[in-house]
Image (tube, rainbow, N blue to C red):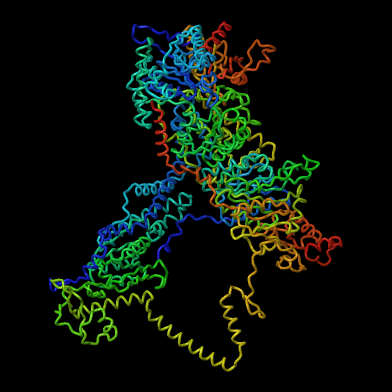
Amino acid sequence: MSAPANDGIRLAAVEALRAQGKLSPSIVAGASLASLIAGPRKDARDDFFASLRHLRERMREILAVDDSHAPAGVLPQFLSSAMGAETDVFFDTGALAQALHRPASKAAKRMDPVRRQRIESSLSVLDEFLSAEHSPYQLVPADGVPEAAQLVLDRFTRLLRAIRTARLESENAFDPAIHPERLARLQWRSATADELRAMPMVIGAGDVPEVSLSAMSQALQAGLPVQYLLLRRSIGVDLGYIAVAHRECFVMESSVACEDHLTAGLCAMGETVRPAVAIIATDPLLYFSRAHPIYVYNPDKGDTWAERLTWHAADPVEVRFLGKSETITPAHAAWHGHLTPVPPDGWSENQIPLSEYLDRFLDQVKDQPSKAVPYLWLLDAAGQPQRATVSRELTMICRDRRMAWRFFEELAGIGNSHVEAALAAAREEMDEQLAAREAAAAESGKTEGAAIAVRRVVAVLTSSSRPAFSGNSAAPKPVPPPAVAAPPAAQAAATTPQVVVEAAADAYIDSFLCTSCNDCMKVNPRMFQYNAEKQAYLADASAGTYAELVKAAEGCPAHCIHVGMPRPGDATATSAVLAKAAKLR
Amino acid sequence: MNASALESKPKIRGNEPAEVTQHIVEIVSDSGEGAQTCGQMFGALCAKSGNGVWTVEIIPAEIEPPARSRAGASGIRIRLGSGPVTNAGDEADVAVAFNEQVLYSRIDTQALRPGTIVFLDRTWAGNPMDSIRQMYAEAVADFHTRGYQVIEVPIEQECRKHTEEPRKGKNMWVLGLLCALYDLDMELVRDDVRRRFARKGDAAVLKNLTLLDDGYQWTLANVAHRFHVPARKLDKPMVVMNGNQALALGVMAAGIEVCSMYPITPATSASHFLASSFEQTGGIVHQAEDEIAAIGFAIGCSYAGKTAVTITSGPGLALKTEFLGLAVAAEVPLVVVVVQRGGPSTGLPTKIEQGDLLAALYASPGDSPKIVIAPATIEECFHFMILARNLAEEFRGPVMVLTDANLATGQQPFPKPTPKQSWMAPPVDQSDWEKGVPPFAWDPESGLSIRPIPGQRGGEYVLTGLAHDEYSHVAYESSINQRAMDMRSRKLAVFRSTLKPPRVHGDAEGDLLVVGWGSTLGAIEEAVDALRGEGLRVSSLHLRFLSPMEPGLKEIFARFKKVMTVEINYSDTPGTPHLTPESRRYSQLAMLLRAQTLVDVDCWSRVPGSPLPPAMIMAELRRRLQEVN
Amino acid sequence: MFGLLQDLDLEPQVKECHLEDYQGAEARWCPGCGDHSVLSAVQRLARDEQLPPERTVVVSGIGCSSRFPHYMHTYGFHGLHGRAFPVACGVRSRRPDLHMFVVTGDGDCCAIGTAHWIHAIRYNMNFTVLLLDNNIYGLTKMQTSPTTRPGERSNTHPKGSFFAALNPISVTLGINNASFVAQTVDWNPPHLYATIKAAHRHQGTSFVRVLQRCPHFTAHVFAPAQEDYSRMLLMTHPDGINMDPAVTRLFPNRIEHDPSNLAEARALADRADVYTLGLFYRDPEAARYDLATAQGLGMSSESKLAAVEKALDRFLV
């Protein structure tokens, strides 16, 4: 922007607000912002390192166990060292070694050398990684992000291979036929979100106007787990919206004047493993004037705009100075060279404050010319307020910002045009229906229909998965209170849907009640068998006699064998047996 | 007669200190007067100067016994030497008594001899109570009659000059006395005092230094005696500790992670040390609800792959025997330390005895072959724990380590061990179990096998105390039990084949061979050396491996006219009523040796509740030698 | 976007275990014995929870029920009479990775092993205890057990037992730090299964008493309750033992009992007129000793060595 038109004039509001802007140096410094982003990942990183150390210890243990199986483990010199300082005084260590080498299984337990080599090499990668210094993030110029990310990801992929190998080895699940080929194909995208969170972050920092859009777009499109931290110092291109257009990236715009939002947003940015862009207005006026939208677009939250976009609604801010008040507009943030002071004798009715001008004219009549001229309040060299008219160019910038604001609002669900259209249509339809119903009611003059309607509404409102009311009862049956005292047995029996409601003609077993006690098997192992749950079922009722069936049912501790009626011609179904059977159906 | 007195005749050289090769000092006081701290500091300072040292505490049975009583004597014996000192020795050369009554407890145990220099606090002579003044006067007269060189010292009066609480300051004053008496480098002593009391603040350091210096100066001014025990230059760092601390450190150095115990004297102090230090090596002490649970817990750990140790004493061993049998039958590695005390029953809880040898070998029902080892020195207490864990794992079963109250409470300097990675237990084997290998794949030659550990895929088996086959399946066939018992016993045979024959101390042949085990090593060898110095043909042999027993004994025994054991446990004394050679009950090692070697091994054993002093052993050996010739 | 591409091929694949994978030797208990019911419930649970057989340990003492480990195809420890608890505590002390069951009987737990039972409950280490209580010594052929009803005849008390039966639930509820106390019966497998499952999932010592008949010696004791469900009282609660409502309805007598209410739990446990089934008490906050005994696990041997060196230095002269 050009130099101020007149050094003598000052936009007092700017000074007042800039003073309010909490431009604490800690927030503005890129590194501090970066550490804010990295903060939420500390736990993930600590857990990751702990798991690596654990894995490393496991690998060492496996090797140590193998060493103890090694022939060296029973070599005399090893023994004389392992058994304490005085072994050689008491033992013929050669003989001891020979004795201990005897168990055949011991020598056979030696690990396959290929496996050992594999464990050792992944151990060395783990060792190397754990012994290196690790900064939680790398701050690079925004345009250097793709290259920096590539380096970090390559190292990370190598570590991932070692982790996967070690994990398989710790369970002794490594299959040489499958896993080497899959390990070779392994890339950083196979990492879990927690692993990605533990990876050193690549944070590209820069000023909005200087960022190469194409390089950034490539990184975002590729889904690289990188973070852009861009500072906006003045009104310019809607880079945030361009980033949002990549659809699956985390994007936030915020302002140093809006510290809570900024901090929370950067923390959320630290949580995500998607590519992320943060655009931060360093001039508080960009925020107060709504020239710079404040929002977080976080695709981790869901798939819809409503879930993803969190809009930070900001009320228009007024400043008051020298008894005059004025709504802050984008012009306040970009006034240099665009204001023309008007001495008090030049003030006229046609001059109206810029914010009012924007409200009254630009929204209503779009580009239609008007006699009104927008102005802002300035202070002259003597400290007296005076009007300054705003150039057309600046007014159009203000209009553009306002539209951008509304555009984002709509994305966030505020004043959504689709919703409004749908609402209007629905309202119209409802009105029509109501009108029709009123007409019909007037026609029949009966209340019965209304009662049915009410019942339906109640049914819908109280509906559970099953129909809650029967035909002859208007209201749903209340849910019976839970039993606090034991009801009389007889009543309980009546209301309990017993497994057997009526005596079945055919014999059967309530298998789920079977205790697997083998008692019925003892009676007839062909008639009774176990199912996949090791509970008995009637495998073949014809494999034995009715008397056997009754005997098994009598003995069954769970009383889950139901004997049914005897098959015709079964001579064992004597009257005595039938008498017993009567109780067992 | 005093064995060591022979070598330690003072050489008087005018005002110069008398040079002695060894000396014994006792400090006795009422409980709580700090005699033990004083003695430990003195012992450590002597060790630091390059002397051989053995210290042993004198502990009353009660926690707060009445003051000025014989039963309440609390104190310490320090034996110094030019060379290594291996036992507590005979009668004291010097005794410091904080009152005359506590000294009587030492007189009762024959700890003093005519000529012993007695430093006695004379403050009691001015006590307001007539009875105390009278007791004091009578005792001093009595001490003179007994031939002690009594030096009355105003210990408490002197201390009162510097402290309101002389009861808590006397020990520092006495330390100063001893430093003057034994010509110690005072700078060394002051450094030690500063280090030890630094935590309590400058005032405490200053007070103790003042008391120390006062005792030192008073002695220089008032006592004619001076002794000097020449020291060797130390070529390596030395540590001083008692046997229980050595055991505990050995447990840590062996990579054992669990000590499961139930409080029992005199074993408990090992667990106390572990309780405070074990966590630094990642270990835990489990105090179980009883002795049975203590070993059960240890067996559970061992079964799950972490070979554990349980530490107990005789009555605890009795309770553990059923589980011990299980560990043998199911071949569970386990280290069992038995710090022996006087038995039978509750017996002498704080006193020494070697009475649990046969219990360790045979107390479990049925045949339960197990390895039993016995360290003979405090240094061995440390190293044998590493050995024990290894043997338990390699030979797949319990290893019992027998020590006793003498080793447990005695302190001795020895070269600081250099712990090694190879001493540590390897990590728990979680590799896949080889298909088709049963959990008891006994090698027919050695009975050895490798065990599966929970977590090893394919190794699933059920450990059982029932007779079982190699699959750990319950034996329903008669031949299985025979085979399994054979295999378990064979492990001991193969273990024995790896041992070297024991070393004979003295000539390999002669008139008398003395066999010992455990803490008696130093006293026996000192007695044997003294007799050999007189030209007598006596040698000794000390066993560390008691089950299986070290090889070659029969051959060694054949070269001596007579073989006898010296032990601190019970045996019938020949010539007592009704006793015939057939009915005589022998001491425990003698019984084993007779059975193993078919040699007519004699024994001499006593149960005084205290270590056998060299002079007493000497006297007995001299008598036996006369019988032989 | 992320995580979707995760290469599952490189995760250690765990073999799916079937019921047969948990079946060891063929059970030699008598036909009709309640132990079978518990065995197959535990096997089903192991299958449903996919417990790796090599990481599952069943510890027992001596007695009919203590044969249990032999019939599981997992690691097992069939130890000494009354001593299952110390062994289990020892196993657990340094092996937080294992799934553990302790199977014991009324003689094993409530007579010879009483001291260990009391203290195991205090220790509250993480394992499931199944007390298979048939009110009699079976293996040694019908001697009075602590839970035998007064007047019941046995080979040691041919004129009937003198003593009031010990109530293992009341005793356990009286021990400080009890954290899970439940009772079930062998003859209702769904409730048995649901109880063992809740016990297994509980972190701490879960004490489950299974009332079960001995078909030879105590069938008559439990027969009335088997035949008439009204002789049992089912405790229900959302935090209790949850099972199919159809099975719940088999129990005509039900009571809502909040398992965090210890006083009510004790009152219910003391009821002599019915067998009270379900979860009496649960305290997920009770202190767990196994968390303390696991201290130092995973310490590297280098740091151990350094610590030993340091400990020895304290004794330098």
Which x, y percent locates residue B227?
A: 38, 12
Up-down: is A9 above or below C304? below
- The mark tally for this picture is 0
User: Can residue B234 be spotted in the picture?
Assistant: yes
Q: Nearer the viewer, residue B593 or C111?
A: C111
Query: In the rendered view, does A247 fall on the left or right side of C152?
Result: left
User: Front-most of B348 and C26?
Assistant: B348
Q: Can residue A160 be seen in this view?
A: no
Quadrant housing the N terminus of chain A: bottom left
Answer with the quarter of the image where residue A311 lies: bottom left
B368, A582: nearer the viewer: A582
- Could you tell me residue A441's position as x and y percent? 57, 91
Task: Answer left or right for A89 relative to C26.
Answer: left
Q: In this view, does A3 lie to the left or right of B205?
A: left
> In the figure, is residue B446 to the left or right of A367?
right
The C terminus of chain A - image quarter: bottom right
Residue B468 found in image quarter: top right
> Farthest residue in the right direction?
A575
Position in image of residue A284 (x %, y %): 26, 67
Q: Residue at x 44, y 28 (%)?
A: A85
Q: Is residue B339 above or below residue B85?
A: below
Q: From this viewpoint, which residue is outermost toward the bottom?
A: A443
Q: Nearer the viewer, residue B444 or B251?
A: B251
Q: Position of residue A379 (x, y in %)?
A: 17, 73
